[in-house]
C-alpha cells in the first residue's frame, strides 16, 4: 500500500511538472547601465509567489550564465539561488503566475526589483541598473579573500559582481595527516563540484581585464580531523604564495615562515575557531576577517560559536542561547579590538566562502585605495598595510591628519589627531562612530538623503587626543527591515607615544589567556608535542602582554 502511494504521488508530481513545462512562458531580458546604456554583467534572482526559484541562460554564443545554489550546511531559512550573467541577453521559461525579479551588480549599483505577472504570451524585458557611486573613479578597488569558486567560474562571476581582486582557494586540506591538495572536498555532501576540480594555474595573476584580476595560488588549512579522530582546530588562508605547501598542520609555524618568506599574506578566516588566538602571535597573522563567511545576504545562519565571547564584549544571546546577526558582528569587532589593544597590527579583510555557503561572491568585500590607478601588486601591498576599509553596504572613506589608514604616527608627548572623512550610502546610515583603543569617542547621526540624488552622504570631522599609545578606527552601520544589518569599518591608524607599547585592559588579556589555557587542556592528549608547544608559546606571549595590562574600568 505504501509503495503504491509513493508511486501515485510520483506520478502526480511528474504530471504537475510536465503541465508546468507545457504551459511555460518564455521570458527574455537584457541588463544595462541606465545612464550609458552599456550592457552589464549582473546577478539575477527570479522567484515565484509560491517560493520556487528559476535560473536563466544566456542567448548569446559569446555569453555565459552560471546558476548558483550551493549550501554545504543545510539551513532551511538561509537560501541563495541566483544566476550570474555576462553582459549579454538572457532567457528562461516559467509557468504563468506572479514573480519577483531582483537584479544586483556588486555594491555600487542600486538593487532593481520588478514585480511581474506572466501570462501565456512571451515577454521581452529591459532592466536598467542605476549606479549610485563609482568607487574606482575615487581610486578605490574591491576584493575578497575567502573564495571557493573555481577559476573557470570567475571570469563570469567576478565581472557580474564588479569585484576587482579574488583569491580562489587552490589547495585545501581538512585533515592533519594530509597536505593541501586539489582533491574534491569531503565537506560537500552533494559530491564533487559541478564546475570540476580545483586547478593550479601557477602564481602569476590572471587578468580578466585591466581592473579585474584573479590571484590564483592560495591554500586553506582547515583542520577538522587529527589523525583518525574528529577534532576541530579551525581555518587559516595562505594568500598569493609561490610554491606548493607539502607540510601538514598542525604545527603551523614552519608553514607561516615559508609563506612570509615568499611574500604571501596570512588571513585568519574567523576569530571564533579554537586555534585562532594561537595563530595570531605564532603564525604572525596579517589579516583579520571583519566581514566573514557568517555574514550573508540571506538569513543569518550560524547562531552558535565554537568558542564563547568574553563577558566584557556584551554579546547578546537569545533565550535559546543563540547569537543573532548583531551579536555575531559585536563578537567579531570586540575580538578584533582586543587583539589591537594587545599590540597586534592586523589589517581587516573580508570573505564569504561563496562556493560553499549560500552567499554571492563579494557580498562582503574589502576596498583598497589606489589613487594613482589599479595594479595588482599595489593592491596586495595596500591590503596588507591596511590602506583599506571593509563593507557589505555603505562606503566609508576616511583619513587621520590627512593620512591613509594603516599609517603609524609617533610622538614623545600627548598627540592630537583629526579624524575626517565621508560616509556615502544608498540606504540610511544609523550612525558613524570613531573608536579609540576599543572605546567609542565620537558618534554622529548622518544627514538625511539628498532628495535629488536619493543618496545619503555625510562628512565627518573629530579631534582625538592620545595620551598613551593606541589606535583609532571609523565604522558605520545601517539597519534594514527585519533587523538585518550592514556595516563598513576602516583599517586602523596607529599612534606611538614614546616607546610605550599599547596597553590592553586586564579583562582582555584574561580572556585570551583563558582561551589558550582551555585549548591546551582540550588538545593535550590529541596533538603532537610540537603542535601543542605552539599553543604554549602563544600562552606565554599573552601572559607577557598581561604584565602591562591596565586595570579594568569600574562598572
Image (cartoon, rainbow, N blue to C red):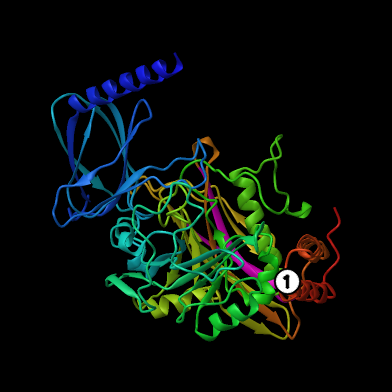
Give neighbour class at mark 1: few <14, some 14-19, many 20+ (Cα, 10 Å).
Answer: few
Determine whether, in the image, residue 496 is placed left or right of residue 430.
right
The quarter of the picture where residue 332 lies is bottom right
Q: Is residue 528 magenta?
A: no
Return the residue nearer the eye: 452 or 326.
326
Determine whether, in the image, residue 515 is placed left or right of residue 474.
right
Q: Please say if 229 is above or below 302.
A: below
Q: Please say if 100 is above or below 167.
A: above
Return the residue nearer the eye: 209 or 229.
229
Q: Across the whole image, how many numbered discs are drawn on residues?
A: 1
Return the residue nearer the eye: 233 or 43.
233
The quarter of the picture where residue 372 lies is bottom left
The quarter of the picture where residue 542 lies is bottom right
Determine whether, in the image, residue 334 is placed left or right of residue 118.
right
Magenta range is 457-479
Q: Is residue 475 magenta?
A: yes
Residue drawn 29% across the image and 62% down it = 155
- Is residue 421 visible to the viewer in this orientation of the structure? no
Q: What secondary structure characterizes most of the magenta part?
A: strand
Q: Position of residue 399 (x, y in %)?
A: 52, 71
Return the residue nearer the eye: 481 or 152.
152
Q: Position of residue 490 (x, y in %)?
A: 54, 65
Q: Position of residue 1 (x, y in %)?
A: 44, 13
Q: Position of residue 277 (x, y in %)?
A: 69, 66
Determine whether, in the image, residue 51 is placed left or right of residue 91.
right
* Residue under pointer 1: 528
- Is residue 11 visible to the viewer in this orientation of the structure? yes
Secondary element under disc 1, as helix, strand or loop, is loop
Amino acid at each position: 500500500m505504501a509503495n503504491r502511494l509513493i508511486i501515485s504521488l510520483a506520478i502526480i508530481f511528474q504530471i504537475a511538472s510536465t503541465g508546468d513545462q507545457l504551459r511555460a512562458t518564455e521570458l527574455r531580458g537584457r541588463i544595462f547601465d541606465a545612464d550609458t546604456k552599456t550592457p552589464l554583467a549582473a546577478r539575477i534572482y527570479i522567484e515565484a509567489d509560491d517560493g520556487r526559484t528559476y535560473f536563466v541562460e544566456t542567448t548569446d554564443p559569446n555569453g555565459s550564465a552560471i546558476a548558483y545554489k550551493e549550501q554545504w550546511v543545510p539551513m532551511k531559512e538561509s537560501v541563495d539561488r541566483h544566476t550570474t550573467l555576462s553582459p549579454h541577453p538572457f532567457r528562461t521559461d516559467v509557468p504563468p503566475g506572479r514573480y519577483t525579479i531582483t537584479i544586483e551588480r556588486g555594491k555600487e549599483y542600486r538593487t532593481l526589483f520588478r514585480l511581474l505577472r506572466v501570462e501565456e504570451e512571451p515577454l521581452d524585458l529591459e532592466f536598467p541598473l542605476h549606479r549610485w557611486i563609482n568607487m574606482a573613479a575615487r581610486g578605490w578597488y574591491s576584493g575578497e579573500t575567502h573564495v571557493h569558486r573555481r577559476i573557470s567560474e570567475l571570469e563570469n562571476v567576478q565581472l557580474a559582481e564588479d569585484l576587482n581582486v579574488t583569491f580562489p582557494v587552490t589547495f585545501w586540506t581538512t585533515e592533519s595527516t594530509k597536505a593541501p591538495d586539489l582533491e574534491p572536498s569531503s565537506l560537500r555532501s552533494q559530491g564533487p563540484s559541478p564546475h570540476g576540480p580545483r586547478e593550479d594555474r601557477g602564481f602569476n595573476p590572471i587578468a580578466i581585464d585591466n581592473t579585474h584580476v584573479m590571484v590564483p595560488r592560495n591554500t586553506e588549512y582547515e583542520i577538522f580531523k587529527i589523525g583518525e579522530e574528529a577534532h576541530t582546530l579551525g581555518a587559516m588562508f595562505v594568500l598569493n604564495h609561490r610554491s606548493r605547501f607539502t607540510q601538514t598542520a598542525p604545527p603551523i609555524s614552519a608553514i607561516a615562515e615559508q609563506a612570509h618568506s615568499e611574500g604571501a599574506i596570512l588571513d585568519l578566516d574567523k576569530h571564533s575557531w579554537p586555534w585562532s588566538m594561537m595563530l595570531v602571535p605564532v603564525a604572525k597573522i596579517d589579516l583579520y576577517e571583519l566581514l566573514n563567511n557568517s555574514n550573508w545576504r540571506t538569513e543569518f545562519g550560524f547562531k552558535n560559536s565554537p568558542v564563547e565571547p568574553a563577558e566584557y564584549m556584551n554579546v547578546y544571546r537569545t533565550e535559546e542561547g543563540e547569537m543573532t546577526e548583531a551579536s555575531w558582528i559585536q563578537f567579531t569587532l570586540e575580538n578584533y579590538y582586543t587583539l589591537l589593544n594587545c599590540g597586534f597590527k592586523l589589517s581587516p579583510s573580508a570573505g564569504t566562502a561563496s562556493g560553499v555557503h549560500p552567499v554571492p561572491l563579494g557580498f562582503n568585500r574589502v576596498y583598497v585605495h589606489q589613487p594613482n590607478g589599479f595594479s595588482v601588486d599595489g593592491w596586495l601591498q595596500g591590503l596588507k598595510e591596511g590602506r583599506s576599509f571593509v563593507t557589505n553596504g555603505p562606503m566609508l572613506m576616511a583619513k587621520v591628519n590627512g593620512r591613509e589608514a594603516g599609517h603609524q604616527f609617533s610622538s614623545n608627548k600627548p598627540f592630537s589627531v583629526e579624524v575626517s572623512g565621508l560616509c556615502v550610502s544608498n540606504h540610511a546610515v544609523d550612525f558613524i562612530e570613531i573608536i579609540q583603543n576599543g572605546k567609542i569617542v565620537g558618534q554622529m547621526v548622518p544627514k538625511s538623503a539628498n532628495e535629488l540624488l536619493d543618496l545619503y552622504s555625510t562628512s565627518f570631522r573629530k579631534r582625538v587626543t592620545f595620551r598613551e599609545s593606541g589606535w583609532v578606527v571609523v565604522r558605520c552601520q545601517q539597519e534594514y527591515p527585519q533587523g538585518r544589518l550592514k556595516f563598513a569599518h576602516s583599517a586602523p591608524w596607529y599612534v606611538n607615544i614614546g616607546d610605550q607599547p599599547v596597553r590592553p585592559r586586564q579583562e582582555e588579556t584574561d580572556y585570551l589567556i583563558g582561551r589558550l589555557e582551555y585549548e591546551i587542556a582540550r588538545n593535550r592528549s590529541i596533538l603532537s608535542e610540537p603542535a601543542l608547544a605552539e599553543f604554549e608559546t602563544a600562552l606565554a606571549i599573552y601572559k607577557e602582554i598581561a604584565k602591562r595590562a591596565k586595570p579594568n574600568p569600574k562598572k
